[in-house]
Image: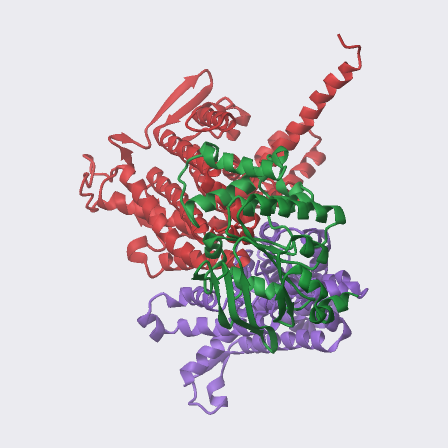
Amino acid sequence: MDAIILQILNGLDKGSAYALIALGLTLIFGTLGVVNFAHGALFMIGAFCAVTLSRLLSLSHEVAIPGEVDFLGNPATRDVPYVFDIFGEALGSSIIDWAVPLSILFAIPIMILVGVIMERGLIKHFYKRPHADQILVTFGLAIVLQEIIKYYYGANPIPTPAPAAFTGSFDFGALIGFEPNTIIYPYWRLVYFAFAAVVIGAVFAFLQFTTFGMVVRAGMADRETVGLLGINIDKRFTIMFGLAAAVAGLAGVMYTPINSPNYHMGMDFLVLSFVVVVVGGMGSLPGAVLAGFLLGILESFASMREVIDIIPGINQVIIYLVAIVILLTRPRGLMGRKGVMED
Amino acid sequence: MGILEVKDVNKRFGGLQALGNVNLSVAENTCHAIIGPNGAGKSTLLNCLVGKLIPDTGSVMFDGQSVLGRTPFEINQMGISRVFQTPEIFGDLTVMENMLIPCFAKRDGSFALHGIRSVMSEAELRDQAEHMLEEVNMIDKRDMHSASMSRGDKRRLEMAMCLVQKPKLLLLDEPTAGMARADTNNTIDLLKEIKEKRNITIAIIEHDMHVVFSLAERITVLAQGTPLVEDTPENIKGHPKVKEAYLGEAA
Amino acid sequence: MFGLNKKDASLLLIVAVLVAFAPFLLNPFPEGSAMAQFNAGYPDLMQRFVIFGIFAIGFNILFGLTGYLSFGHAAFLGVGSYAAVWMFKLLSMNVLPAIVLAVITAGIFALIIGYVSLRRSGIYFSILTLAFAQMSFALAYSVLTPITGGETGLQLALDDPRILGSATTAEGNIPVPGLFGLEMRDSVELMMGSWVFTFNLGYYFCAIIMLIAFYLSIRIFRSPFGMMLRAIKSNQQRLNYTGLNPRPYTLAAFVISGMYAGLAGGLMASMDPLAGAERMFWTASGEVVLMTILGGVGTLIGPVLGAGMIKYMENIISKINSDILHGWFAFLPDGLEDLVVTMIYPFIGKGWHLTLGIVFMLVVIFLPGGLVEGGQRLAKLFGRKKADNPKSASTEPAE
């Protein structure tokens, strides 16, 4: 029992990332009808927002240490981050420590901007083109974006730690009545899951309870009719694209402490997220979330030693295997609607 | 015994009874029209004949064989060709290529690996295709990109593609829908010509009474998924039930 | 000629001439000159041109004709490579059995994957092929290590059986792939003034196979089979109602293109007898998509052009460094020179993928027909100019 709970917990963080990316992919596909291969790049850009902010916060200048000299006899200096000058040393150092969560504020406007520019500048012109063209042009864009990041940040992963308060693990099992030390779970992964749950909840609430969301949902169901009602659906869809970009970006920001960001992380996640979308059902938001968590948890179960001993290599292929089986038995995915991409 | 025998066919979509106990017999070498107001189940019936839909109960026999459970291409190979409401042609191909494909399907069946022999070397099939194009007055358009033609030409091409297969039964799904009067009359003339020249059975679904009465020898009136009456055009014209269900609506 | 019409025959002839004289054509700059780094006439690169040409020609038979976009074609290339290397290990170093086995194995793989994947179309088909390829990659990398060599890849060893050949050479080395005594790495160098041209046996072997593959693809394009494939892309509904079953046609196209990929993989292993799982990674599948689109999807010559273009860029652009750039722009004033170099720098060397991405996007946006369409537009442009001239002349009184 404890082993099962542990695997479910282990699957949650990856599952959260899949769910968040798949949610954005589905929003874009459902509203704009575009298959966006550059969505993984948005996840990656989000992660590098966190890298950038923590670098910006650590920018420092040299300050002479009064009364000390180095071995050459020059006045000794030390690096003092600018934030110390502004906020004082105590607050300043905790700001640096909290760089990753703070990046959320920094990333939201940037991601929305990136998303809107992408939609207005490029994707808008591909609404009427075949899906294959959309895949190709966004695939090209993904290459360009990741190469730009690679140029400025290098090819190596950049460790970006969580705040000190959330590093380390805690005994989750003891909390829910198991023997101590059976279910040890890192704090930050729990934070990530909670964060993902909040973001997903917010997106659903936004779509469910606002007029804007209502129009978007109506547009997802029947674009032409909504257009005929005289509602400017395009503008709202642009904003939806920005929102989807922000969701992917936030998923990336908060993922940095779990996996040090590198320039190809977007592509790595994209391929799996596409599988997630297809398994969940193209165009179904709940399907995307459900399939994201489901596949994340399945992946973690397949990585258990006991399972690998029986079926070697299953951890590497489980997601693809599930996708193949689901696509062949339920062509519309778990929760797909009729008539989506069935030409 | 007609070439097409539909017996007690029922089809439900959820709570909607689209077809209820449909019986229909189309005699060989006649033109049989199926008319009825919108939502009468004409298209559903047609889709049941060509394998796109499978009826819940009942049987559909064509030429002594059941078509139920067969795919559209198998049914075509049995000798039923279908013309769609909006012309369905191979838009990326030339007119001649459009004509050749049904010729190959007729000669080689639903799948044949032709190796690496050139299309150009198939003189016999090319002759067939050209002959048919001449018959429908389209030989001058043989090398045209078919998507760039007018709707009327596309319709004629589609018809030619069906006829070149020498089908036993030609199904027409509102062949004049959305056409101007002149085009409609051209289509009627073309169909009349086809009927005279060949031994062919035609089943036509049509909205336009003008078309129906100029072509059909038998008419079945469908209303709410059930055949109301079947008779000759003369008798249908004056039939009170039909007036009530259909012509009354139009008046 | 060979059952081709005049236009196709001349296309084949042009390609044959270009391929035959590639060692000259690709080495236009004298050895030791500043431009010598743009020479592409060395065996290794020329082999890659034609091998990836084969890969792209095969991919185009599927994507170009039927419109089914496979994102997993590299799996077949990888399978072909493994099969060829195993043939070298077990049978002999002769490349012919290796290549035959590579093609057959890839064909069987394609049959299985295609049978399942082709039950869906559109993006679902793309995702299914991607899933299968990623599965093959993951398995080759981990569980199948005894067959694939895992992370290190599959290599030849001195103690391989090679039942029809010798396990070792007289000197005690691992033998190299060859064709009845001729070694694939054999080269002849021709010095003409300060030019050096290399004629490599391996290259010419691959080139002949590519010409055969190209010829077959022309025949497929012009055959009733090719016409059916184009009809599938155009209107599957009509095809169904015309009495034709699209499934076996697409499956045949899938298997044929998989065999082309296997052929490319087998040749790759014949030039350099090792095989690694990274050849199956999905970016490798993406690369062949790029090649086909860049050259011109659905055209005969496009994929070959695209493959050549991308492999040329990969090799040449990635070799340029900032010193070379400074050398080129040395004529500019210092400040301007630095500025220009800084602006170009991200696109060269390690940044060549950026250039590739941008070029690819531009092609998809503005030139969906790829280089071939670009060429046709240019030809039209000049053709019109030419046509204009007689017109202006015709204003003069006629004779």
Residue at left offset 32%, top offset 41%: C99
Q: Is residue A139 above or below residue A261?
A: above
In the rendered view of the protein, which quadrant contains the N terminus of chain C? Answer: top left
**Residue at the far right in the pictured view:** A230
Q: Is residue C19 left or right of residue C142?
A: right
Q: Is residue A65 visible?
A: no
Visual hue assigned to chain B: green
Decide which of C50, B245 is in the foreground and name it: B245
Horizontal side of C362 relative to C153 (left or right) equals right
Across and down, in percent, residue C209 comes to 38, 34
Above or below for B179 versus A303: above
Depth order, front residue of B80/B28: B28
- Which residue is at a point 22% across and 43% down the rendered structure image? C91
Foreground of the two, B138 or C71: B138
Query: Position of C269 compared to B154: left or right?
Result: left
Tell me how the rendering is colored. Answer: by chain
Chain C rendered in what hue?
A: red
Number of dots carrying numbers: 0
- Position of residue B117 measured from the top left corner of the image (x, y, whole percent): 42, 35
**Rendering coords of residue C75 (x, y %):** 41, 51
Asked whether residue A112 appears in the rendered view, the answer is yes
Query: Where residue C341 sits in the image (x, y, percent)?
Result: 65, 37
The foreground one among A167 and A319 is: A319
Asked if A159 appears above or below B164 in the picture, the reply is: below
If the image is split into quadrants, where does the C terminus of chain C sit? top right
Write the residue at 40% across / 19% down. Answer: C190
Which chain is rendered purple in the image?
A
Q: Residue furthest bottom?
A: A177
